[in-house]
Image (cartoon, coloured by chain):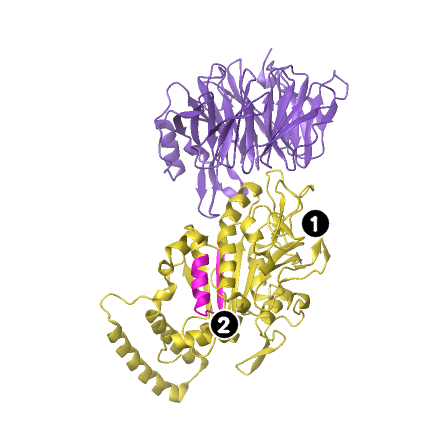
Amino acid sequence: MCGGLAATPALAEAVKRGSKRVLVVFLHGGVSQLESWDPKPGTDTGGPFRAIPTSVPGTHISELLPHTAKQMHRLSIIRSLDTKNGDHGRGQREMISGRDQPAPLDYPSLGAVVAKTSTPAGFSLPGHILIRGAGTGPGSAAYLGPQFAGVAMNDGKPPEYTARPDGLTGEDDRRRAALRSRFNDRFAGRRRTADTDAYTFSYDQALDLLDQREVFDVTKESVRDHDRYGSHEFGQHCLLARRLLERGVPFVQVNHSNYDTHFENFDFHIEQLGEFDRPFATLVNDLTERGLLEDTLVCVMSEFGRTPRINDRYGRDHWGTSWSIVMGGAGVQSGGIIGRTNADGTAVEDRAVDHGHVFHTILQAIGVDSLGDFHVAGRDHPIADPAKGPIDELLA
Amino acid sequence: MIDPTKTHQTLEYKHGRPLLAVRYAPDGKAIYFSAENTPPQKLLLAGEGTEPTVTPLEGGHDSWVKSMAVLPDGDAVITAGYDGRLVWFDVREEKPRLVRVVEAHQGWVRSVVASPDGKLLASCGNDNLVRIWDAAEGRELAVLPGHASHVYEVAWRPDGTAVVSCDLKGVIKEWDPVAGVLRRDIVTADALWKYDTTFRAEIGGARSIGFNADGSQLAVGGITKVSNAFAGIGTPVIVVVDWDQPAEPTESDNTTEADKQTAAQAAGLKQLEGKGAGNGVCWGVAWHPEGFWIGQAGGGGGGWLRFFKADASEDFHAMKLPANGRGMALAADAQSVAVAMANGYLRVYALHA
């Protein structure tokens, strides 16, 4: 990374061939599992929506996801999340770190772990990118170091500081960087530390990003693709995610907000899943057709689900006891269902799992030994929660 | 003698499942109600001290029933479902009989109402359409496009010459139901809609609708001054529109509540809000022939009946309900209202001592 190294076509090909990627779509607020992945029509908790068949015989999801239903043979549903938590902040931290909260340490987020383990040598883009219009900010890298922390594309715009100030030419900037490198190298010869490496990295990454700013420009995609994904924010962010994944970014997270529907849950899920469905299905399809899904783990998650009981304002409240996520691609079985809830969705009947198991599974699916350790500054840190393990039956 | 200040409960029926909607039979001898995950029901009122008889209107739907129309002769009930269907029932016999099922709208049917002469029906729904039907034969007579968002409510003007509709954004239109065309965009009741930038979603729509006796005023109920759409933090409101002096169509670009109030005043719209009203939605509105509006609110602030004189914007009387109400109907003799309760009860309130 030192001195800057713009991606070349040859490198891009090498990146595509060998590297793995993770795409997380985070539905902030807590999407209702009964209005999405685990419908219970005709029950007292089921609400007014019906279930529709999918491309997997025998598997049904909510009628609010007609486009995603046609992609379910590429995805699997985990219907047995039991995270025992109904707090937004805690739920977000647990799902994205795989660790029970509150925790004695600040654990690295999934994006940081993936960036650390799966960024190819010489890769000049950030390994951990968050595309957000709302929802929480980029994940922490904790003890892995700031070079693996998330880089935010707020409102889908290029990361901060990827544009040169007016009046500063590229040539002048490179000459300044060369001078800085000489001073840095002389200093590092005497007092090199992890901190100085981090400072150097951030300057070098900034320079690399300046030369690759076009990577973050979704307007460069075709008019046809813009139409297929839709002009609204989430559609544009999914198209941007495809662009980044195609260029080998190891971890991309797209936020979609919001699903915290304590009031008029059904109307709002029509609206929010109406935004989610087509772009997400289009993205899964495109990743498949481009040969990327076999190396890209896709996961749709929230911080928790929603109560089976419908409150008196047509709402559903927070629920961490029996809810669902979806996973597919990379080393994950497709078209499967892991776990089962009871008839009215109020409890897990089979194969209860939580954020720790999900974290392990995502990493294993992209070839990372989640049972191993990071060795940082002379200490060993388990990559994932050592008290948990992967969902083996989900791994291909 | 009608005296809203003496309103009191005269009937309580426990259905068990949360109720959704309620309608009176024209002769006042029966009440129809719908509920979550059960067929709609016909409750035959009995004498004091006698348990009412309740029979289901079975079949035709595989989702909740959102709205019902009772024909003026009382012989038929047409139910509107979240499954997009209109279902006709013959209710003359003791056991209601399913007559026909029509796939009426793409997505929810939010409302169905019979014309005053009982010959036509108007329905509306999530396909952004209003439709006109032959009430006896179930034939679709007209499809009325024009709304750009889900249409929440429809109503017939009392003289039967017009249908009005109101959508998610408070856009109110008048239609010619016979010619099957739009007559005019009446007004946009901005107060009924908001885009919540925190939760990135729209909240709004007419949750109730009704004309006064001579059709000179239209009342549309909903929620306004929303500060948190996903928690339902807002004020129940009835927006009253003058039929004869409507405002010019306006673009709905008002963003602040103050802007909306100013625009409403400029457009000649009156907003009825309860004194000290808590959070909630106006789920029911009806004009009483003795010259006042009745609003039924439900939400975080509890369930309420509120009574507004025609020339006032604050209620002259309010009565707290034991639970949230989700719909209200005024009996044909105007002596009582029935309220569909979220806690599974149907309650009837006499509007007099």
Q: Please give the residue where the numbered disc 2 appears in the rendered image.
A: A115
Q: Position of residue B191 (x, y in %)?
A: 43, 33
Q: Residue furthest bottom?
A: A190
In the picture, the disc for residue A158 is none
Q: Residue at x 64, y 50 (%)?
A: A60
Q: Which residues are magenta?
A: A238-255
Q: Is residue A295 left or right of residue A361?
A: left
| Chain identifier for the yellow-coloured part of the image | A
Q: Residue furthest right?
A: B50
Q: Is A315 one of the magenta-colored residues? A: no
Q: Please give the residue where the numbered disc 1 appears in the rendered image.
A: A346
Q: Is residue B4 left or right of residue B212?
A: right
Judging from the image, what secondary structure is the residue with disc 2 in? helix
Q: Which is more toward the observer, A365 or B35?
A: A365
Q: Is residue A132 visible?
A: no
Q: Is residue A14 left or right of residue A162?
A: right
What amino acid type should be assigned to the residue bearing mark 1?
A: Thr
Chain B display color: purple
Q: Is residue B116 above or below residue A337?
A: above
Q: The numbered mark 1 sits on a residue in which chain?
A: A
